[in-house]
Amino acid sequence: MKVTWDAIDAATWDAHHARMGAALQQDWAYGACMKTLGVHVLRGWVTRNGEPVALAQFIVRYFAGQIASMALCSLGPVWLVPLTAKEKVQTYLALKKTIPLNKLRVVLFTPAEVQGADLGLSPWRRVMTGQSTVMLDITQSLTDLRAGLDKRWRHRLGGAENSELTVHRVGTNPGQYRWLLDADMQQRQQRGLLGLPLQFFDLYAQSRQQPSKNILTIRADVGRDRVAGMLFLIHGEAATYQVGWTNDVGRDQHAHNLILWHGIQELQARGVRVLDLGGVNTIRSAGIARFKMSTGGQVITYAGSYF
């Protein structure tokens, strides 16, 4: 396996990333935004006999005056061809050996894979258990998607469709979706949650020529009052549900069921094949976890973090 670092262009990276429906954290634009925010980013391009087999984007943190560093490949590498466990081992070793950082470094991988014989990483080198998420295949017809919803989820959707809620697609200018980010920030502070910095969203929205290819925001109103909203980040042929907010009125009328259903249709129209509904925690946020799991998506528990 041969690794070249920061040697290919955005268009080439994007084409392969989109084809694989890969994670937001491995998207070129995600790395570009992090760079603008002052974070060091490295991109590895792995080939075998001249043919691309993987790409890996690392976020780098420095310590002790940049003498030491930690590089994290989150939800990567992105495998571009099927590889055996042995070939994955060779890829991981090549990335760790050639990464252009000082010797005092820790290189971590959190692959977008479940535990199994083909993982290519030793369980003895796992330092953190993996998070769970729900992945929804939205290449299905709306009829099939609706049939796949949990009975209660589908009933609530029907009630929301027949309620006084109105749904609106929000524009991509920062001022048009800022209210939702501000509401999300309040939620984070109240619940002690972490998330992407607010500036990231403005950067990501403008990271490609067509902002509608990067971000989708939908809100629900009752009369002139906003009662709920959702923001999705689009990365190639995949999207991630990133921000959600509702007040008591929206919650009572199941506005998020209606918004997510509209969001699925909008994302389908933009060529998105898979929707990552984000992390699920059945202990800390049981209600949110149930909401996501009841969409009929596949619950995936990733293998964890390895060094």
Image: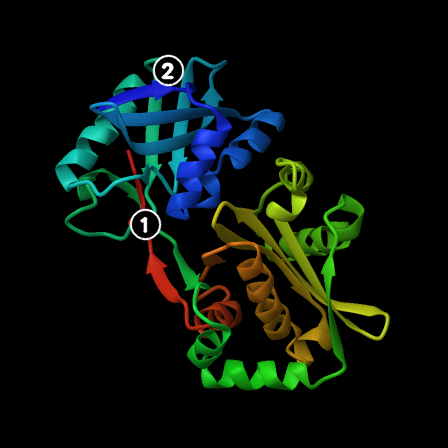
Image height check: is 92 above or below 142? Answer: above
Q: Nearer the viewer, residue 131 or 50?
A: 50
Q: Residue at x 59, y 74 (%)?
A: 257
Q: How busy is the neighbourhood of tag 1: few (under 14 within 10 Å), some, or many (20 plus)?
A: few
Q: Examine the image and state in which quarter residue 160 appears.
A: bottom right
Q: Is residue 144 left or right of residue 230?
A: left
Q: Amino acid at mark 1?
A: Thr
Q: Which image quarter: residue 170?
A: bottom right
Could you tell me which secondary element the residue under label 1 belongs to?
Answer: loop
- Which of marks 2 and 1 precedes in the sequence? 2
Q: Position of residue 221 (x, y in %)?
A: 77, 71
Spatial distance from mark 1 to mark 2, Cα to Cα? 27 Å
Furthest toward the right, the residue is 224
Q: At which x and y percent is residue 74?
A: 40, 39
Q: Which residue is mark 1?
A: 129
Provide residue 291's location: percent of width, then percent of height: 51, 72
Q: Is residue 131 above or below residue 225?
A: above
Q: Nearer the viewer, mark 1 or mark 2?
A: 2
Residue at the (76%, 45%) spot, across then down: 173
Q: How many other residues sit within 10 Å of disc 2, few (<14), some (14-19) or many (≥20)? A: few
Name the residue that disc number 2 marks.
100
Residue 278, x across and y down, in percent: 48, 57
Quadrant for the C terminus in the image: top left
Which residue shows up at 50% across the image and 55% down it? 272
